[in-house]
Amino acid sequence: ATPTALLVGTGRGAQLGILIKGPEVLESTRRVDTVVLDKTGTVTAGQMSLVDVAVAEGVSREEALSLAGALENASEHPIARAVVTAARAEVGDLPAVENFTNVEGLGVQGIVDGHAVLVGRTALLDEWSHHLPADLATAKADAEGQGRTAVAVGWDGAARAVLVVADTVRPTSARAVALLREQGLTPVLLTGDNEAAARSVAAEVGIDEVIAEVLPKDKVDVVRRLQSEGRVVAMVGDGVNDAAALAAADLGLAMGTGTDVAIEASDLTLVRGDLTAAVDAIRLSRRTLRTIK
Ligand code: ADP
Ligand code: MG
């Protein structure tokens, strides 16, 4: 490949809203056959809002929101932002949190008003033997079946509430997935979120292959496993938890709306946070390299 032809491709990329780290990047794009898409913040907008609160018998919605909101106030997670906004609107000032811990990919824990509080996946609450009562488990399963994310809240030794947050699929995601398929590429949805919510979002945008409930540190292993099966992998992500996977992929694409860490780990940045630009990038590189040959 002559450097001049590759640079022409790079310039065209800028016009399409794609920032390419270096001309050589387009070379690796050519053989890509699998495109791994992170769910939250990539296929979806990542702007969550609290849409439902289910509480156990004898528990008030206000108490659940106050304790969960206070704890989430120390977290930067999109779920946390949604919970804090709703809690502030409903209960006003939130109590302080002590001994806050973020359990990567699982949730958060800390002390609020003298209560040990946990918010997150049931796997986290189960570690503390805070098992969900049947009615809350049903509320959680129903929400997840609708593609929503439901987190459990536990305090004083039991799981006592479920918070349901909703995200929106980006308007261009389904079209981008269809265009990827037209290019002969296989889309895969990868997420730390639960299987049911992941399947629902996948169905909405037209993805068949779903890898869910993957801890942040394990996303890179998923990419490596696909590569060891002989697949040439492009990964599209936005979060700090995607950085290692973006770096390990044959081609890493970051959403321009994402974190700096993800952008730094990537070969390409989709400036507008629009997944159809990923298809343009792959098409562009194929066309550029055809010109060179
Ligand atoms: P994703 O891969 O979709 O970006 P994460 O790995 O960040 O997701 O989180 C995976 C899951 O862990 C979330 O869906 C949620 O159930 C739980 N979780 C993580 N952080 C928090 C938090 N601050 N509050 C509540 N739940 C959390
Ligand atoms: Mg994400």
Image (cartoon, rainbow, N blue to C red):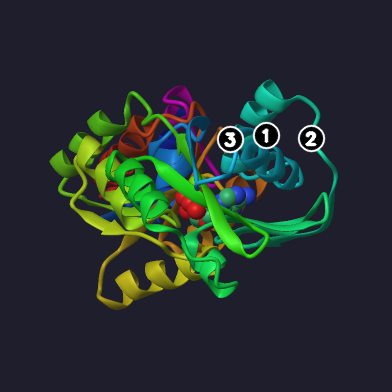
Provide residue 149's location: percent of width, then percent of height: 43, 44
Q: Amino acid at mark 2?
A: Leu
Residue 68 inside the magenta-drawn segment = no
Q: Amino acid at mark 1?
A: Val
Circle 3 sits in a helix, a strand or a loop, which is it?
helix
Cβ of mark 2 under 8 A from ligand 1: no
Which range is magenta?
A: 12-23
Instruction: Read off the residue under disc 1.
Output: 84
Instruction: Read off the residue under disc 3.
Output: 61
Dot 3: few (<14), some (14–19), or many (≥20) neighbours within 10 Å?
some
Answer yes or no: do the residues labelled 1 and 2 have beta carbons within 8 Å? yes
> Toward the viewer: 75 or 23?
75
Instruction: Read off the residue under disc 2.
Output: 94
Q: Say which residue appears at 44% left-offset and 40% top-offset.
A: 42
The nearer-to-camera label among 1 and 3 is 3
Dot 1: few (<14), some (14–19), or many (≥20) neighbours within 10 Å?
many
197 up-or-down from 246: above or below: above
